Image: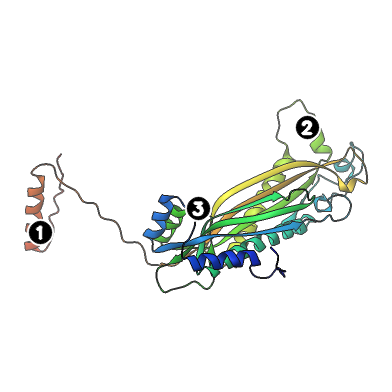
Amino acid sequence: MTESWSGAGLPPVAAARIAEVRESGTWSSALTTGEFAAIRSVGFEPVGQVMGSAVYHVGRSGRYWGYHACLYAGAGLGIGFGSGAGFGPAGIALSGNGAPSAALVKVMDSARRTALGRMTAECAALGGDGVVAAQLTMAPFVAAPGCLEFKVIGTAVRAAGSVRPRRPFTSHLDGQGFAKLITAGWVPVDLLVGMSIGVRHDDYTTRRQTFSYRNQEMDGWSALVHHVRSDARTQLARQGAQQGGDGVVLADGNLRIWEEPCIQSGGNSEQKDHVAESTLVGTAIARFASAPAKPSTMTVVPLNNSGDRLRRRLAQASRTGRASTRPYTAQS
């Protein structure tokens, strides 16, 4: 790329690629044959493969990774203190409650939104109404410590009718899943990522349970994973409501747990924290048909003269104006 770019709109190289696709009239996609057929069956056509990417530097905050501060007042005391010195059991510093990790969640969300926005811009430039089978990934940027690349790739589609959405939708659903959603009276709205980070100090109780010979639940760590998963779901539901969705269809969920030196301990190398990161990916969906679906009918083909008896009963019912109350049993 030789042209300068302000970061707004499509990158020059992407704009050139989109212009070439529009001029050629030939589209590309990552759809399978089944996905292509399913999308066409509900009145949509693919218009081209689209993508968006963004590389972000995730800076440090304070000493070490300040994002992972446990905020426990008893941190830094000896092994026998903390919860035993009037501080009580360690709590969970949760990003959804405004803990320091909230800044990390915010920059991750901003990076994903940037990548999604660029993919949506490519879709709009191709005349698409939305993107299906969108795959969102995050990976370290080669030879650049602290840098991450956020990338999303999907296939832009366009409806055959004249009704256009206000802005292109994005969805993780594959071709068959998208067709089923449309057939059921729902439409995708936006691809969402709900993320939560929780940090819990390994207090006296946790250490005592760890070294115990008894089989027992690790109460603090159970609470840690429960809170981060619950908060991630809360963030996903909140985003779905903000985008005008009636619900969210989940695509994937991931939970990472690791140990960090405690930032609050003031250099006490014996003090540790456990960090849990929960990420949920899904698509917000909205209803476009409020009328109940008509019940499907089943055709019964008799294999003997039962059909003749049934026709006679139906003819008799039409003459009398009412159906017979005697049950009919088909014989094989």
Seen in the picture, residue 82 relative to 94 is either above or below; the reply is above
Q: Which label was assigned to residue 45?
A: none
Disc 1 target residue: 317
* Mark 1 surroundings within 10 Å by alpha-carbon count, few (fewer than 14), some (14 through 19), many (20 or more): few
Tell me which numbered mark, 1 or 3, is placed earlier along the sequence: 3
Given the image, on which type of amino acid does mark 1 rest?
A: Ala
Residue 95 visible to an observer of this rendering: yes
The location of residue 167, given as percent across then percent down, is: 54, 71
Instruction: Give the residue at mark 3.
Output: 30
Percent x, y of residue 52: 62, 60
Circles 1 and 2: CB distance less than 8 Å?
A: no
Quick check: 181 left or right of 79?
left
Q: Residues within 10 Å of mark 3 (few under 14, many from 20)?
A: some
> Which residue is rendered at x = 74% and y = 59% of the image?
107
Q: Which residue is mark 2?
A: 210
State which tag comes first along the sequence, 1 or 2.
2
The x, y position of residue 195, in whole percent, is 67, 54
Residue drawn at the location 42% of the way across and 63% of the way down: 44
Which three-letter amino acid code belongs to the residue tagged 3?
Ala
SS state under label 2: helix
Q: Quadrant of the C terminus?
A: top left
Cα separation, mark 3 vs mark 2, equals 49 Å
Q: CA distance from mark 1 to mark 2?
A: 78 Å
Looking at the picture, how far across and down is residue 144, in whole percent? Answer: 78, 51
Q: Quadrant of the N terminus?
A: bottom right
Quarter residue 62 falls in: bottom right
The quadrant where residue 79 appears: top right
Q: Nearer the viewer, mark 1 or mark 2?
A: 2
Residue 211, compared with residue 166, is above or below; it is above
Under mark 2, the amino acid is Thr
